[in-house]
Amino acid sequence: MSLPVLPVYYYHDHFKEMLSFVCDTYGPVLTETHHAFVDRFLSLSKDAQCLFIRMVNRSGTVFNPSTFKYTEIADPVGALGELAVAGYVRALVGQDYAAFLACLAKPVLFDGAKAAGLSDVRASWPKGKLTEYCLAHLSFGTAFRHCGGEAFIALGDTEPLEFLLYLYFGKTEHNLKNFALRDLGILSTNDQADFSARFADADEARACFHYARLLRQLETKSDEVYRSSVAAILGGPVCPTDYAFDLRSRAAHKAGLHFEKKGEAGLAIQLYRAGCSAECHERLARLLYAEGDRDAAEDLLRRMIDDPASDDEFVFASDFYARKFDGRRTGLCTELLRAGRTLRVDDIWRGHPEAGIAGVLRRQGLEVFHVENTLWHCLFGLLFWDELFESGQLHSGFDWMPHCLKDRTFALMFSSQIETKLQAVASNAALPQILRIVAGKWGKPNGVFAWDHVDMDALRALLAGANGTGLATMLRLMCEDYRAMRDGFPDLMLVTNGAVSFMEVKAEGDVIRRNQLTRLRQLGHAGIPAEIGRADFRFDPDQDYVVVDIETTGGWTGGDRITEIGAVRIRNHEVVAEWHSLLNPQRSIPAKIVALTGITNDMVRSAPLFAEIADSFMQFMGDGVFVAHNVNFDYGFIAAEYERLERRFRFPKFCTCAGMRRHYPGHKSYGLGKLTRAYNIELKDHHRALCDARAAAHLLNLINAKRDEGRGGSEDIAA
């Protein structure tokens, strides 16, 4: 599908639209500098306005004017002159050095380096290495002379423009490409937004912009940028709101980590002290202790314990204090992990521990849902949909996450509505509200959850089976600080006789992250049982194996189709169920395939389509392991059929061919026919699906007998 063609003055029209909106909406927030920027822009000719907009929409800040060829600009030379007089462009200076080299073609840079006397540069070097070498060994002036710097220009101060774009988009932007991405159908926008001011206070807007811009600059990971950021953090504007403090703290934490890694502890300590976040406090406490200032570390930890900024901060401070000052030998995370319940899981699930443990628990009679963070996101977003998305908290069409969740004002702003809904949750009366939103708003995009993650069965079970007061407590924490509560929730939700509990799954070598520990403690304190399940990977005879064989019209998954599926379920080395169906491949079966399998076009003409048996086969698979002889062939065809139905087919794979090679070496051939003859396995109708599946099941039992002896064999899993 071809993309739409944008109108000639597309960027110009949207730029003026943005200026008009910001000036009308944020008049009191704009300084004289910003008003002067707008006035100067409006005084330019249309050619000059269009050229400036084109420049800011391009990558980088340094340009060669010879490349300026735009249909909407009649006189680019005259327009460039206007921009120079107005101060929008200037000649290159030393601070443009890296940007200047970045916009040079590699041959030009190589020739310039050679001409400047760098005889050891190589044409085979990638552009990045060549650029770094020139920056280290050539002065800006030398590179300017030998690489044609006089032909280039740079944008002037872009801070006023970036501030205007920040007010409009709610995040730091350098250009208007979001408009084009929207109108080309590449970027979705929110038609429910109110186009209103996200900042009512000038000091808040300027402080937030200052630190948001700084965070974006720190993404370059340049030591020079990090060093220049120190003054911008320590001497930056006062933060009048929590959101501004959060941005400053994130910048301080990021810069502090940089200098801590470089061994500059004193500078890192200054930066961490400038932050007010749990992350800054944690690094500060650790660094003070490591530097030998135990008294300062102990004092900070006591303050964190007495007045924690969050549950996560309290958990860290209590744990660190106990280990460093109270003599406890192991941390809370280690203790919790050791105390977790151990469940035997077949080692074929080694790469999928959550699914493996879920299967074990289902065999024990529990109902199990894979939930992790998505269940909580969905519950929160659905319960508070009206407040989040229908009350003016989305300030432009490019917003998806309500600003009140970013700046932690949601709980204060909607306190009465929140309390009413939490009372409904506590009294197990919230389901009608959830169903109303699901019925009326299904599919409407938002920044809190994805609709394809909404599992109504899981939500019903949670609302009906969890402690209602405890559930309201968890939701209240999310209302108060959504950003801190977005992740760390346990992997599985378990339902036993209607009662809900949660399990965080850990495999051998896994650690518990602090946010996971915090969630487990929060759930426990709220009266909602939560535990850790540790996977003990070894051969499990109670594991279901589904041995599958298919027949097809050929060997190409992209064009050939399945004509027959046979499957045998094995548990404890015994056949417990079988499944079989011919399939209509919706194409002719070649004569050589008919001769091989005995399956004719007449036999499959009235057979079901794959779509008609897809549910039945998936149900037969259950929590089983997919087994086949040369497993990737069978698995690939079946996965492709589900993909055509826009459904996922994901199971661990086990190959009987590879397993026999490992455990029964020495055969000249490991084809199914040869192996069945070698081990006296019945194979009456070779190349018919169910017969071949039965034969492969016998091979599986031979392999599993060896695995049972050695309690191993995970290497048999097909990649």
Image (spheres, rainbow, N blue to C red):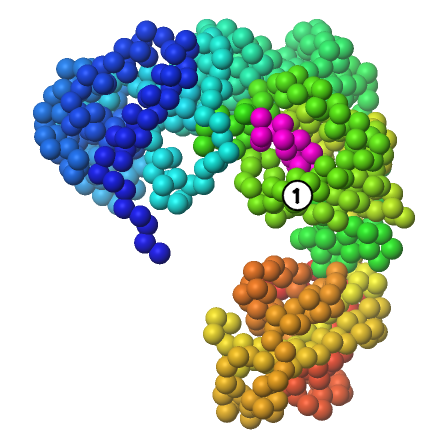
- Is 383 covered by the magenta stretch? yes
* Relative image position of residue 234 (x, y in whole percent): 48, 8
> Looking at the rendering, which quadrant does residue 69 occupy?
top left
From this view, report whether residue 446 is shown above or below residue 358: above
The quadrant the C terminus occupies is: bottom right
* Relative image position of residue 456 (x, y in whole percent): 72, 47
- Tell me what residue is drawn at x 50 percent, y 77 percent: 560
Whether residue 89 is visible: yes
- Tell me what residue is drawn at x 82 percent, y 22 percent: 328
From this view, report whether residue 456 is shown above or below residue 252: below
* Relative image position of residue 135 (x, y in whole percent): 28, 27
From this view, report whether residue 165 is shown above or below residue 605: above
The quadrant the N terminus occupies is: bottom left
Dot 1 corresponds to which residue?
438
Magenta segment: 377-391
Whether residue 376 is visible: no
User: How many marks are shown on the rendered structure?
Assistant: 1
Per the image, label 1 sits on a secondary structure element best described as: helix
Mark 1: few/some/many CA within 10 Å (<14, 14-19, 20+): some
Q: Amino acid at mark 1?
A: Val
* Relative image position of residue 269 (x, y in whole percent): 56, 12
- Is 444 covered by the magenta stretch? no
- Tell me what residue is drawn at x 47 percent, y 8 percent: 203
> Looking at the rendering, which quadrant does residue 620 occupy?
bottom right
Residue closest to the eye, 84 or 222: 84
